[in-house]
Image: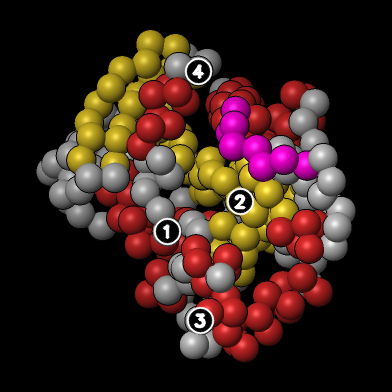
């Protein structure tokens, strides 16, 4: 972790400028939209894939910081945000369904992640599980319930290659990719995304809390089984955003 008293190398922020709670979308373009749910939202910085806004929820300072795509940039964000005093992270992202019960537009709340990435293995041996903080998961579930959203809780798959999932047959290691995908299906993995394993493992190494909530864009397994009639791709992440916002409010209220 970098010195908390200096400006962070990538994020261009310092200790005292952020809240203890931070929401983590991937897309920098989503930060301002998420910050609109804050009281007194204010732009802080933007550098590379990292855009930061701060504000308040329930009278307590909170922040939102984009991470870009994948584990490496997520780990950098978490390391530098932690150096600035952030203690709880909630990933707000998108995912593709794997389990047949997961439909377009649903919300997925991760309890853990398959570590099919590279970044988490720089922090922990492969036997270590990438799991979310229990209290954060509970708050996300309570939030989704109170908002009336269709949600699922369970394990997600975190991978490093978007096209390794979507075009596995053209890859030189197609057999290995397809074999693992079949395993995730049989094990009941809910969805595929790209940051959860890194987030959970990095936070575990730093003694911090982390959760993740995802908007389901599409389920390729339902489509392949002919079960997706009338299910269009959905790209509006507002349900995942609102779930995370309400979860942070619950966590702050419980803390008080």
Q: Residues within 10 Å of mark 2 (few under 14, many from 20)?
A: many
Image quadrant in which you'd find residue 253: top right
Specify the farthest residue to the top: 40
Which residue corresponds to mark 2?
95
Nearer to me, 68 or 55: 68
Mark 3 vs mark 1: in front:
3
Which residue corresponds to mark 4?
37
Mark 4 vs mark 2: in front:
2
* Rendering coords of residue 85 (x, y %): 33, 40
C-alpha span from label 3 to label 1: 19 Å
State the quadrant of the N terminus: bottom left
Which residue corresponds to mark 3?
171
* Rendering coords of residue 22 (x, y %): 43, 36
Mark 1 vs mark 4: in front:
1
Q: Is mark 3 on a helix, strand or loop?
A: loop
C-alpha span from label 2 to label 1: 12 Å
C-alpha span from label 1 to label 4: 25 Å
Q: Residues within 10 Å of mark 4 (few under 14, many from 20)?
A: some
C-alpha span from label 3 to label 4: 42 Å
Q: Decide: marks 1, 4 in contact (CB < 8 A)? A: no
Q: Which of marks 3 and 1 is nearer the N terminus?
A: 1
Q: How crowded is mark 3: few (under 14 residues within 10 Å), some or many (20 or more)?
A: few
């Amino acid at each position: 972790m970098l010195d908390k008293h200096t400006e962070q190398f990538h994020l261009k922020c310092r200790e005292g400028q952020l809240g203890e709670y931070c929401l983590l979308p991937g897309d920098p373009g989503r930060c301002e939209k998420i910050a609109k749910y804050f009281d007194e939202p204010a732009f802080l910085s933007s550098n590379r894939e990292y855009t930061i806004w701060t504000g308040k929820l329930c009278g307590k300072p909170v922040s939102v910081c984009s991470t870009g795509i994948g584990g490496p940039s997520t780990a950098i964000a978490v390391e530098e945000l932690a150096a600035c005093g952030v203690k709880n992270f909630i990933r707000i992202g998108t995912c593709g369904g794997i389990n047949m019960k997961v439909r377009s537009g649903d919300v997925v709340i991760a309890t853990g992640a398959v570590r099919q990435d590279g970044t988490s293995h720089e922090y922990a041996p492969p036997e270590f599980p990438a799991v979310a903080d229990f209290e954060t998961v509970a708050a996300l579930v309570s939030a989704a319930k109170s908002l009336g959203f269709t949600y699922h809780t369970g394990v997600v798959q975190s991978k490093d290659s978007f096209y390794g999932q979507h075009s596995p047959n053209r890859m030189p290691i197609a057999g290995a990719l397809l074999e693992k995908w079949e395993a995730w299906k049989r094990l009941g993995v809910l969805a595929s995304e790209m940051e959860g394993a890194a987030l959970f493992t990095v936070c575990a190494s730093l003694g911090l809390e982390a959760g993740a909530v995802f908007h389901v864009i599409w389920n390729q397994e339902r489509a392949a089984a002919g079960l997706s009639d009338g299910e269009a791709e959905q790209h509006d992440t507002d349900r995942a955003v609102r779930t995370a916002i309400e979860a942070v409010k619950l966590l702050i209220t419980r803390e008080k």
